[in-house]
Image (cartoon, grey):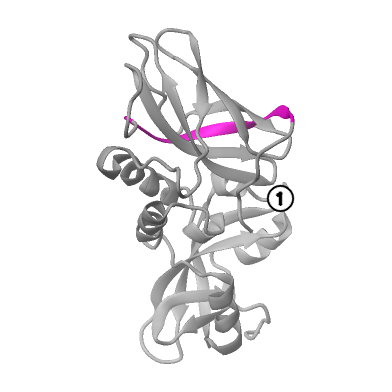
Amino acid sequence: MPLFGKGGGGTQPSAAFVVGAVTQPSRARKAGEVLISGVVLAPGRGQLRQLTAVLPPNASPPAVGAEFPATLHSSGSLASVTLTHALVGGTTSATPTVGGPGQWDSGPGGVNDMAFAPWLAAQGFQSPDFGGSLSPGLAALLDQYAVQYAPIIDPQTDSWLLASGERVRGEVTAVSDLPLRTRTMGNPQMSVAWMTFLVTPPQGPAYQATLRMGFSTAQRRVELATIGSQQPLRRDSGNPTLITIDRIPVFH
């Protein structure tokens, strides 16, 4: 499900802006102006957005990972963010940019994208999460970093694996929760995590493979993501690290 909302309407202060990258903008209009890329989080939705802010003298830029209150339009798009300066104890109102593919600011020489993409990937985001709304350069960088954590499996690939993938056994060896990605889900019972399996194929040695998994309920997470549990998997025999959990149990 794409995470982007649309603009318009009144405003409501019910969200947070999490900083993912802070650099100079491509064209600074004022001294002290910074370009801030991040994720707007609200119940059941998330948006990638950029802000520009002019920081007062001696104020430190917001730290990567810092979270600030945000105001949304009633339709869900970002209206404003208030940044708090830890060193000077003041606040600055940051101005949201439109942030669409044709208006995204990659920073001088692409420096903002090069900082933002690895941070996004480490939070569990992948380019398909944004429904084609990313700028091409940011999407390519995000995919490059995201596959270092887990293969990118779109719905079509998942359907193909379930229908035609080779059946194998997998033991859950590690589970890493993804709290920011989870906060974009539409229900508080839902969650997202990386799951690592020790995969035992019909022939050949066992090996490790990781996938990003979404859980519809807390109970479903316990059923699937308990360390040491055995799960039925499907894999691409031509690309063995491409796996998915089989929806129909085949091992007893």
Residue 58 in the image, given as x and y percentages of width and height: 33, 9
The residue furthest bottom is 203
Residue 226 shows up from this direction = no
Position of the N terminus by quadrant: bottom right
Q: Provide the residue span drawn in magenta.
A: 10-24
Q: Which residue is mark 1?
A: 186
- The answer to whether 45 is drawn above or below residue 210 in the figure is above
**Residue pictured at 47% horizontal, 70% vertical:** 197
Query: Does 12 appear in magenta?
Result: yes
Q: Name the quadrant of the C terminus.
A: bottom right
| Residue 249 placement, left or right of 129 | right
Furthest residue in direction left, as rendered: 109
Residue placed most toward the observer, 250 or 184: 184
Chief SS of the magenta region:
strand
Q: Is residue 248 left or right of residue 201?
A: right
Q: Position of residue 105 (x, y in %)?
A: 39, 40
Crowding at mark 1 (Cα within 10 Å: few <14, some 14-19, many 20+): some
Residue 65: x %, y % from top left = 45, 34
Q: Nearer the viewer, residue 196 or 114?
A: 114
Q: Residue 47 or 126: which is nearer the viewer?
A: 47
- Seen at 36% across and 88% down, the residue is 204
Look at label 1 and name its amino acid. Gly
Give the x, y percent position of residue 199: 45, 77
**Residue appearing at x 35%, y 22% in the figure:** 29
Q: Is residue 230 left or right of residue 13?
A: left
Residue 30 appears anywhere in the view: yes
Secondary element at tag 1: loop
Residue drawn at (44%, 14%), measured in percent from left and top? Answer: 86
